[in-house]
């Protein structure tokens, strides 16, 4: 059973949220992926309402709403997104949305998510832009520490900071990691070895699979990731946890 916990709609598919959701559902079905988390993005050409409506047609798809912590009434946006539009989590993208990970307003919004019992997925990929903005694993740790009631997913396992993120996650029981993008982006480097080391060190718990589609087609991202993890020595049992069981347990999807 495979769950993809990090997906976006492809805004280059046919220009509509509906078309993009249909195409994503088709690709997931073809790859035998039982459920996927669609991360809405403010930077995409559709509203949170458009995306919610599009994905509501496909039981395989669940959404996280992207809210700006320093925008207009972020708490209301989040509550409406969950209560009226059916989103099941909050997506934060500090690099694209340009806000501080450990700012007071970010902490406030992430605490609200905890009060609402919904998880927060926060981008943690240190590309050049993010590094120049002052990317630091410590800021992610501060946020998690100040919001102990909120389950936080550090997307992309912190990229090449993966060992730092792992060491911090061990001290922060409310933190989870997704392997999306980083595993394949760094495939020719030493990073995937460190990522697998981190997974093993965490006993393959609190780690989720994600493809970051449309970065790559759903099926090829899955095939390449599985192949890489098998080469790095993951057993069938270990794979079953990171590829699906951990996410199933996290999202309480007993129906799968
Ligand atoms: Zn992403």
Image (cartoon, rainbow, N blue to C red):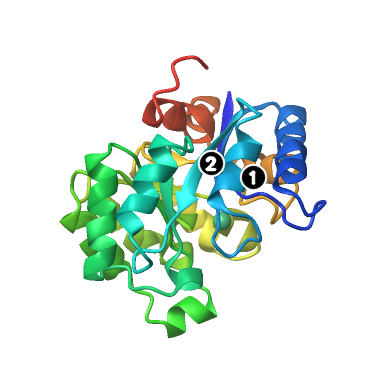
Horizontal arrangement in the rendering, residue 53 relative to residue 167 (left or right): right
Disc assigned to residue 209: 2
Camera-side residue of 212 and 10: 10
Instruction: Kindly report which numbered mark, 1 or 2, lies closer to the viewer in this rendering.
Output: 2
Across and down, in percent, residue 138 comes to: 26, 69
Count neighbours of disc 2 (C-alpha within 10 A) and say few if under 14, some if 14 to 19, many if 20 or more: many
On the rendered structure, is 189 left or right of 66? right
Quarter-of-image position of residue 51: top right
Which residue is labeled 1 in the image? 225
Q: Is residue 49 above or below residue 128?
A: above
Mark 1 crowdedness (10 Å alpha carbons): few <14, some 14-19, many ≥20: many
Decide: marks 1, 2 in contact (CB < 8 A)?
yes
Foreground residue among 152 and 55: 55
What residue is at 69 percent from the left and 56 percent from the top? 215
Ligand 1, by image quadrant, is bottom right
Disc number placed over residue 217 in the picture, else none: none
Q: Quadrant of residue 59?
A: top right
The residue drawn where x is 52% and y is 40% is: 63
Rendered position, 189 above or below 178: below
Front position in the image: 142 or 185: 142
Which residue is at the front of the view, 141 or 202?
141
Residue lying at 80% horizontally and 52% vertically, measured from the top left? 13
Image location (x, y in percent) of residue 231: 63, 43
Residue 184, by quadrant, is bottom right
Q: Is residue 148 left or right of residue 120?
A: left
Q: Earlier in the sequence, mark 1 or mark 2?
A: 2
């Amino acid at each position: 059973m495979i769950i993809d916990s990090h997906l976006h709609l492809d805004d280059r598919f046919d220009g509509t949220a509906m078309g993009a959701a249909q195409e994503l559902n088709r690709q997931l079905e073809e790859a035998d992926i039982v459920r996927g988390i669609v991360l809405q993005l403010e930077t995409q050409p559709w509203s949170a309402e458009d995306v919610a409506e599009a994905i509501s047609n496909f039981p395989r798809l669940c959404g996280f709403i992207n809210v700006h912590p320093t925008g207009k009434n972020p708490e209301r946006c989040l509550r409406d997104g969950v209560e009226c539009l059916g989103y099941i989590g909050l997506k934060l993208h500090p690099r694209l949305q340009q806000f501080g990970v450990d700012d007071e307003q970010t902490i406030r919004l992430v605490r609200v998510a905890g009060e609402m019992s919904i998880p927060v997925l926060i981008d943690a990929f240190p590309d050049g832009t993010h590094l120049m903005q002052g990317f630091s694993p410590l800021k992610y740790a501060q946020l998690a520490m100040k919001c102990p009631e909120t389950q936080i997913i550090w997307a992309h396992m912190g990229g090449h900071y993966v060992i730092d993120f792992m060491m911090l996650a061990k001290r922060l029981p409310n933190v989870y990691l997704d392997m999306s993008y980083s595993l394949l982006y760094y495939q020719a480097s030493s990073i995937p070895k460190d990522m697998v080391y981190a997974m093993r060190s965490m006993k393959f718990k609190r780690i989720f699979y994600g493809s970051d589609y449309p970065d790559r087609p759903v099926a090829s991202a899955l095939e390449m990731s599985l192949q890489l993890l098998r080469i790095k020595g993951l057993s069938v049992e270990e794979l079953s946890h990171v590829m699906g069981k951990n996410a199933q347990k996290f999202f309480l999807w007993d129906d799968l």
